[in-house]
């Protein structure tokens, strides 16, 4: 247990520091950039994410899956990276050539230079994805954390410098993203250069990697659609200002997402290693599920309780995002929980199920957004997105159980979900009052009772 805690800490420390940087930098940026410009940056991110998913060809997943099975780690690294870079280069050229059409499609207007920004973002994003994966699979937790911090500082610094010296537009946010990627890449390749020595591409192995990775493309695109329907619906039925407020609300929720990154970074290699070694106790995964459940629901509740105080740090034009954020808290909570219950699908290599799961979840989110966004705008998008992640968790859990049985306390999880949905509803539709805070305290006490076995276990481990 001590080794797991140490390993988790080494991977998570950077995530926590990055969360602090995001927490303090977002309000500062809100004073420099208007909500409307935030909305435009969000649309850029949507297009960037879909391009990144396609160009990766699922080979990032192949690197994770085969890293411990292959002796020549450098060969696995370069065999997975090479096709993604080549495809990324051609996609970048496409962005540059059709810059005007792309800009009009996203914004209804022509923004000069947007194609070059897309190209730089995409290529740096591909390299940065494999840069972090290489360090992650080596279990070099503190180096991984350091790169995360550099990424966040570069992002913030690049955004502020551009906004103050060139333009307070969405270009500043995009520029910050590129600068963050470049700084993180330089640190990774310099410190970890012994693991990046070029190895001849093994095309026979590459075919095997593609066979495993390519099914992740449609499921990843569906997941992108699933997680992007909210902003697409807002673009269709609302304004860039609403998209900007929604994006600001997501910035607070992204604190939970950073915890998600820290957890999955540590968890995925550990889960595969445990499964492949066969040296696994009967309740290892069940204990992990209970522990992460307790942490997520308690921390998520505290974020909801202090949401209004947090948004006081923002410029006045962003304060309304406080009533958009509550349901979005379900996104990182349910996603992280599903990472502990989806193992049966991944262990059995039945990756086609990911297509079914994300497809159904995306359809639920699409219907919810089309019903709620015209009525409630950004609040409706948040409600639909949050509840659709409950569906996502349910499907992942039920299907995975067919291939690898886990005796998790599912009733306790759903009871916790119902409680946090009630809190989120109050936080969305009612102004902050004593009743809201009293209810948050009551729910916290219920969580402490529900997870008293987990809390007791953690206390015992800390004493040891």
Image: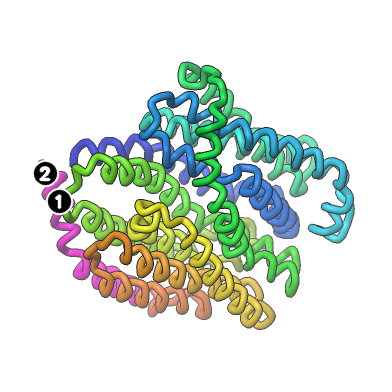
The overriding secondary structure of the stretch rendered in magenta is helix
Q: Position of residue 153 (x, y in %)?
A: 56, 35
* Picture disc at residue 26: none
- Identify the residue position indicated by label 2 in the image: 463
Is 414 placed above or below 47 here? Answer: below
449 drawn magenta: yes
Q: Which residue is nearer to you in this view: 127 or 73?
A: 73
Q: Position of residue 364 (x, y in %)?
A: 55, 75
Residue at 62% across, 74% down: 366
Q: Position of residue 253 (x, y in %)?
A: 50, 58
- Identify the residue position indicated by label 1 in the image: 459
Residue at 15% across, 51% down: 459
Is 98 placed above or below 10 here? Answer: below
295 drawn magenta: no
Tags 1 and 2 in contact by the CB under 8 Å rule? yes
Q: Quadrant of residue 365?
A: bottom right
How many other residues sit within 10 Å of disc 2, few (<14), some (14-19) or many (≥20)? few
- Residue 15 visible from this viewpoint: yes
Screen quadrant of the C terminus: top left
Specify start and end residues of the magenta stretch as a single range: 437-462
Residue at 46% across, 68% down: 392
Residue at 36% across, 66% down: 397
- Horizontally, residue 57 falls left or right of residue 111, namely left
Q: Which residue is nearer to you in this view: 13 or 213?
A: 213
- Residue 160 visible from this viewpoint: no
Q: Quadrant of residue 377?
A: bottom right
Q: Which residue is nearer to you in this view: 93 or 206?
A: 206
């Amino acid at each position: 247990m001590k080794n797991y805690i140490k390993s988790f800490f080494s991977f998570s420390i950077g995530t926590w520091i990055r969360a602090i940087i995001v927490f303090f930098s977002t309000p500062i940026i809100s004073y420099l950039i208007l909500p409307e410009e935030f909305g435009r940056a969000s649309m850029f991110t949507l297009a960037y994410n879909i391009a990144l998913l396609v160009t990766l060809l699922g080979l990032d997943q192949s690197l994770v899956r085969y890293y411990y099975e292959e002796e020549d780690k450098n060969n696995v690294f370069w065999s997975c990276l090479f096709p993604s870079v080549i495809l990324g280069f051609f996609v970048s050229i496409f962005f540059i050539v059709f810059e005007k059409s792309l800009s009009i499609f996203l914004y209804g207007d022509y923004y000069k230079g947007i194609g070059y920004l897309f190209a730089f973002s995409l290529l740096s994003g591909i390299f940065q994805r494999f840069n972090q994966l290489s360090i992650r699979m080596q279990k070099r937790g503190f180096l991984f954390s350091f790169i995360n911090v550099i990424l966040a500082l570069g992002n913030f610094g690049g955004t502020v410098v551009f906004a103050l010296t060139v333009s307070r537009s969405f270009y500043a946010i995009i520029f910050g993203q590129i600068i963050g990627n470049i700084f993180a890449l330089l640190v990774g390749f310099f410190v970890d250069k012994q693991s990046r020595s070029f190895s001849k591409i093994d095309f026979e192995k590459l075919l095997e990697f593609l066979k495993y990775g390519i099914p992740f493309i449609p499921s990843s695109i569906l997941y992108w659609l699933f997680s992007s329907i909210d902003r697409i619906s807002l673009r269709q039925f609302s304004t860039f200002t609403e998209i900007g407020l929604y994006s600001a609300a997501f910035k607070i929720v992204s604190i939970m997402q950073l915890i998600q990154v820290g957890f999955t970074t540590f968890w995925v290699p550990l889960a595969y290693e445990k499964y492949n070694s066969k040296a696994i106790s009967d309740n290892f995964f069940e204990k992990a599920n209970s522990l992460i459940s307790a942490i997520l629901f308690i921390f998520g509740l505290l974020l909801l309780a202090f949401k209004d105080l947090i948004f006081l740090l923002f410029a006045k034009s962003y304060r309304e995002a406080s009533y958009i954020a509550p349901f979005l808290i379900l996104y990182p909570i349910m996603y992280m929980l599903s990472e502990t219950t989806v193992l049966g699908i991944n262990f059995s290599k039945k990756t086609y199920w990911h297509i079914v799961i994300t497809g159904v979840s995306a359809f639920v989110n699409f219907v919810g957004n089309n019903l709620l966004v015209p009525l409630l705008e950004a609040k409706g998008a948040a409600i639909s997105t949050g509840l659709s992640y409950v569906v996502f968790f349910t499907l992942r859990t039920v299907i995975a159980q067919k291939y690898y049985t886990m005796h998790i306390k599912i009733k306790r999880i759903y009871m916790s979900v119902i409680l946090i949905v009630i809190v989120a509803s109050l936080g969305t539709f009612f102004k902050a009052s004593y009743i809201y805070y009293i209810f948050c305290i009551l729910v916290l006490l219920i969580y402490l009772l529900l997870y008293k076995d987990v809390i007791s276990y953690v206390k015992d481990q800390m004493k040891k």
